Amino acid sequence: CSDSFLNITPKGESLESNYYSNPSEAYAGLVAAYSALNTETGNTYCSPLGVANSASDDCYAGGGGPSDMSQWQAMNDMTQLTPANMPVDMWNVNFVGVKQCNLILSKINGVPGLSDADKTRYTAEAKFLRAHYYFNLVIWFGNVPLFTTPQTTDEIYAAKQATASEVYAQIEKDLTDAIPDLPVTVPSSENGRATQGAAEALLGKVYLYEKKWADAANILKDVNGDTPGGTSRFGYHLLANYGDIFNPNNKFNAESIFEIQKTGSQNYGWGNWGQYKSNVYSIMVGPRGYSQSGSNSTAPNFLSGWSFDPITPDLVNAMVQNGKYDPRYKYTIINLDSLVQAGQCSYAKSQCYAATGYFMAKYAPLLQYTSSAGTKELNFDQDYIEIRLADTYLMEAEALVMSNTNLSRAQALLDAVRARVGLPSVPVSMTAIKFERRMELATEGERYFDLVRWGDAPSVLDNMANGFSKHFVAGKNEILPIPLSELTNTQMVQNPQY
Amino acid sequence: QSVSGVVVDAQNQPLPGVAVLVKGTSLGTITNVDGKFTLRDISDARTKTLVFSFIGYQKQEKEIGQATYMHVVLQESTKQMDEVVVVGYGVQKKSLITGAISSVSAKEIDNKQLTRLDDALQGLTSGVTVAQSSGAPGSAPTIRIRGITSINNSDPLYVVDGVVMNGGLEYLNPNDIASIEVLKDAASCAIYGTRASNGVVLVTTKKGKIGEPMRVNYNMQMGIQDAIKKVQLTNATQYAELRNESVMNDGSAPVFANPTSYGAGTDWQNELFSSAPYQSHSLSVSGGGDKSTYYVSLGYIAQKGIVAPSIAYDNRFSLTTNTSYKIGKYVTIGENLSYTYEKNQTGLNTNSEFGGPLSSALNLDPLTPVYVSASTVANDPNNTYASPYILQAPNGMYYGISNIVGQEMTNPLAYEQVQKGNYGWSDNMVGNAYINVNPIKGLNLRSQMNVKKAFWGNESFTPLYYLNPNNNNTNMVSQYRESDQNLTWNWDNTVSYTDQIGLHNFSIMMGMSAEKQTEDGLNVTYQGEPVTNYQDASFNFSLPTTQRIANAYDRQEYALSSYFGRLTYNYDEKYLFSGIVRRDGSSKFGTNNHYGTFPSAQIGWVITREKFFPQNTFLDNLKLRASYGVVGNDMSLNDFQYESIISGGGGSNYVFGTDGLAIGYSTTTPANPNLKWEQTSSLDAGFDAVLLKSLTVTFDYYNKKTTGMLATVQIPGFSGYTSDPWANIDDLTNKGFELEIGYNKSFGKVRLGVQGNIAYNKNTITYLGQGKQYLDGGATFQNSQYPLSRTAVGHPFNAFYGFKELGVFHSQAEIDNYKDKNGNLIQPNAKPGDFKWEDVNGDGVINSNDRTWLGDPYPHYTYGLTVNLGWRNWDFMVFGQGVWGNKIFQAYRRLDITTANYPIAALNAWTTTNSNSNYPRLSDLDPNHNFGNPSNFYLQNGAYFRIKTIQLGYTLPKPWMTAIGFQSVRVFASVSNLFTITQYTGYDPEVGGSSYGIDRGIYPQARTYMFGLNVGI
């Protein structure tokens, strides 16, 4: 018998070797490359916001007890951070993304019938996504293996870590390659797909993290537009009302540059673990045992949550100075205890670990943002806005101040951010920019990385209000340990001091 | 010219059924019950020699000369050395066999209560472990040849007349079996290459013979089956007392004020078990002319189960036919065709602690009545009966529903009602056609096409019912139909040549084979038909499409292409050699291993044929033999496991546009192009001996190593893959020995035959991956936080693993004296009556690290014994079989139902007034995990010896038969499973199936009293 007798073609099931045979299969491969962006559950709950917020001075880890979500507790108290107890999904999920990108990139040129335009665009999108995943990996872990092609099992076991600068070089290359081939804007039916503006904004952020001030300022200027406060060539402008940015009814607004979309329409239940494309972080930050007091209550209508990432007194103190509230306070912090005192609601504070009485507002589990079908907890639909215009304004301002060039533009950028919420101008400086970033971007997952790259993490995180310390060790905790499971039978080397 | 005569044995007893043939012709006859024969019109025959042959006796040729009457004495071939043994793609003389092959002949299985071919192997062959997975009619037993060869799949390969079976063995009527050969060593199995590592069972069916006059045989068995024993459980009064004791031990008030008021209560087992009939009929017609042979047989087996007989039955009808025809001088063509229809019901969920009638009978409280009156249902304050959906019994009353024991436990009689009308069915067609060409002497060309076509499915109806809050259907009735089909074909072509040059005898066979399997199926559910019972249900009702749900599947094709060859050589039948090579290509293998090659070699030395060997000693024949071979197991592989499969949806999706879900497709596991069959190599050494002309001894020692068993490897997360790929990793060994002894001798008018066998096997896991000492998981123990078994390096597969109790603390003083080396209390929180757990690692605390090895679920020794006695027209047979060296884990009492009924042993539970007891104190909270920990408390010795069959037969004297015109008539009475010697307290110490050695409520085997009839015309 010949080999053809033995080469059975599978029915109703595709193999990697014979998939990617038409344009729709190529598109499905591209979708998979995006999918790792909004993975909310893996080894455990793995919202990147939860990990970064728990590590920052904006939140404690919270939850139901000192061992609830131990990986987040370890970010909250870094003495607990070990190769065995660390947010392993920050590693896994991003590598899933890298693998999916490499897979579609390796197949895209051989897809019959795929138009050149689509081929070019898909390639650019996959490169943008790969850059995004690697940027996450390099800022979390520093020393990661660098793959730009699909790997065989043997290659995986032989792989060694690249240096951070090698990874940054690849990120820059991917983004530089992608930018010209990405669309300037996308129709609303394609909202969520990569755009030129998103890629430029990400590249600007990457340059900033690399302290390439001039490059950062240069490209971010293209994103932000010539006139701070005006509309850029991509159509970006600051929304008039700060609160509108986070409203799920206002997705992909003019301030949103790179937005990770969540859906509430998939009727997820607990059996869908690992598949959620909804916002699972919402239910995690909601108060436990919550109920409104009567139908006339002025308290928000939350679904009872699990009280993770309570707002620290540090953030409250920063937003309320001398009795004066930052205009963004009410969109950032819910003072639940005051609502309880006012008789508007109740919640089980005793069951909330590390409770402060302050809860997160931006991603709070408002009942109106979950679907009627499926398990409510698992079907919130609020997006993560990964990069928005106020952020790129402040990043450009930072690059200009750090390089001491065009300070007037830096001042204009800072002023525009403040003016939008009705605050007067303050003289531009790194101190002013740092403060403004904290106010503007609180609980959006930026604070921790800002502190680390500014070198402020030890001084800030180890000297929090009421004597609290996150036990951040300089020279060690800037990056996470490599997960324990990755060291078995591989060439991975553990990060220093872990 | 005509000649007549009589054939007798050495004791001058007439031998009926001896074939008498004129040499070189197809003329012949067989001897009648008096051993007499008559041949007429043999004048034309060129030779005047008669050949007398009879199984178990040496063939004899006798010149007729001028004789008209002959007295022939046949010598028993105690050695049975002239018998041939089927070895796969051919036969070999038994005296020249150098591998480890056990045979079972038709004689050994005739007239036993056998419903399946695999049941026939129990106790008759050494090294084959047979354990029933259920006593339910038609259930398949678990067969292991020389132990567990793979942690993935250890089922042997079955080949019936050249047709490779993939399940569905129930199609074969046991009365059609001529012989079964079990290939045990890798060297013999190598002829089946990549599917043979678990051993090969070759079945040959009965055929007609050239020159054999027509024989008609009718065999009948009718009997009644009964339960052998009940599990001893507490009655209502005892139960209520123990419940009180348990909650009072937890500091609560007693629940039952007056236990004695409940009397004996309901004995659920009595309600569930009942006598069940068994019958089997088989009619065959066979014979042959000078060019053709034929065999036709009809079989019918009908059996009900002793548990819930209304929903446990198996009915089978089979038709088998085979013919052969010789065309001209060189060519023979032939065919085999079997058709079997089976209808059965097996939905009893046996050996599961999660529901089903047996599990319910073991766990339900004895307080709940079987039936309740309509008024009880009407005055139902707690809404226990949830009328109107409660079921009405045939007696007009309603079935009792327990409000004490819930979850999956339901009134077993009510459960029977719900299951009524459900059944499974199958149509099996198995056949082959062949052409044989013998152009010159010794050369044989054969082409055989084998086909197995199976259709099967099932029908069920779910009425509206309410068994308890967890098991009810108050929504819509539904009707379900499933239909599946499978086609397997293989085409074998072989060429063989046998010759003799001087004292050099050799035979060479080469062949090729191709096989393909396809399977598909579909099912449909109709919901909400306007009917209330299964008799009225029909798919003809017009229902909205939303109430008609259909599913279908296609199984991936499986293809195998093979080349094989065998060379056998012997010098003067003294020095023996046999070598086999098979090369298999399988669609399941990885691209780097599309083909696998499986070699083997066997050598033998018949030392008694050496000149130097002293003659006329007690040792008549001694053959030493050794073999080594390598075989594979592709049955553990699934389709396309070597490839990276693209899967879509779920986690691969993303959200674009206005809340629009985009479906993504990607890989989740890396390809493993190196994936291949599991490989088993085995060394076998043994001898065959004949002593004192009547004692045969066969001994084998083997050492079998399985390497590269399939297991998942943990793939690092940076690979980007989310599930672990399969690879060939784990290793294990099986070592053991086998001994078979046969003794046949006549003492005057008494004929004695004894066949015994015993085998020992030791299974050890030797490797589970780099640095990996044990596999995660293990057999679950209900909701216990620990599994009850573990597969670990240095231990047998799935050995029992848990805590070791050292008896209970009889007093506080004993607790206070149980200290570690630092003088600290090991169990400070224990109370008198709690188990004293062994602190295995000596760290002063009892935790998961104190679990240890508690025993092996698989027997180390298996044995069987058959004794045949004959005296004049009487025959008597006893067949027994047993195992030892294994443990049984008794897991059927539910841990999470604290109100479940208690075993009778719980009456002896520790109390302050019964403080010497070693049965732990009863407690619902169970703070010391006396009951919640898997421990040796639940383990019992699994050894047993069972009298499987005892049979007394009587062959009618000749004058009676002549009067009715029959050749032979034999009547017999027999009992199956007459008694079992065992210490095990559960139903049945034979616990096979997927939870081997774990009794979760096994369906016990029945004792059958049977009457039988064998008629030959």
Image (cartoon, coloured by chain):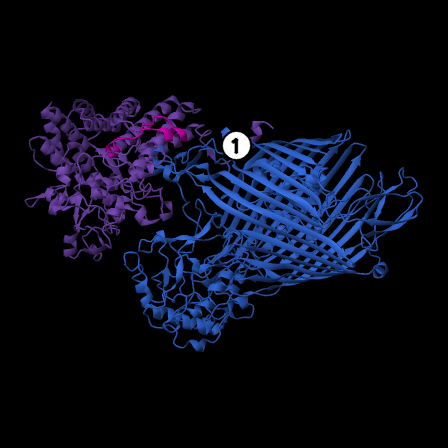
Q: Chain of mark 1?
A: A
Q: Colour of chain A?
A: purple
Rendered location of residue B973, percent (x, y): 70, 62
Amino acid type of the residue that numbered disc 1 sits on in the rendered structure: Thr
Rendered location of residue B474, percent (x, y): 45, 60
Indicate the secondary structure of the residue bearing disc 1: loop
Judge from the rendering whether residue A136 lies leftward or rightward of residue B493; answer left or right: left
* Residue at 51% across, 42% down: B733
Q: Quadrant of residue A127?
A: top left
Q: Colour of chain B?
A: blue
- Residue under circle 1? A9
Image: B687 above or below B242:
above
Image: B507 above or below A173:
below
Q: Residue furthest left?
A: A322
> Which range of residues does the magenta coloring cover?
A139-160
B952, B639: nearer the viewer: B952
In the picture, which quadrant includes the N terminus of chain A? top right
Judge from the rendering whether residue B802 lies leftward or rightward of residue B189; answer left or right: left
Local crowd at mark 1 within 10 Å, few (<14), some, or many (≥20)? Answer: some
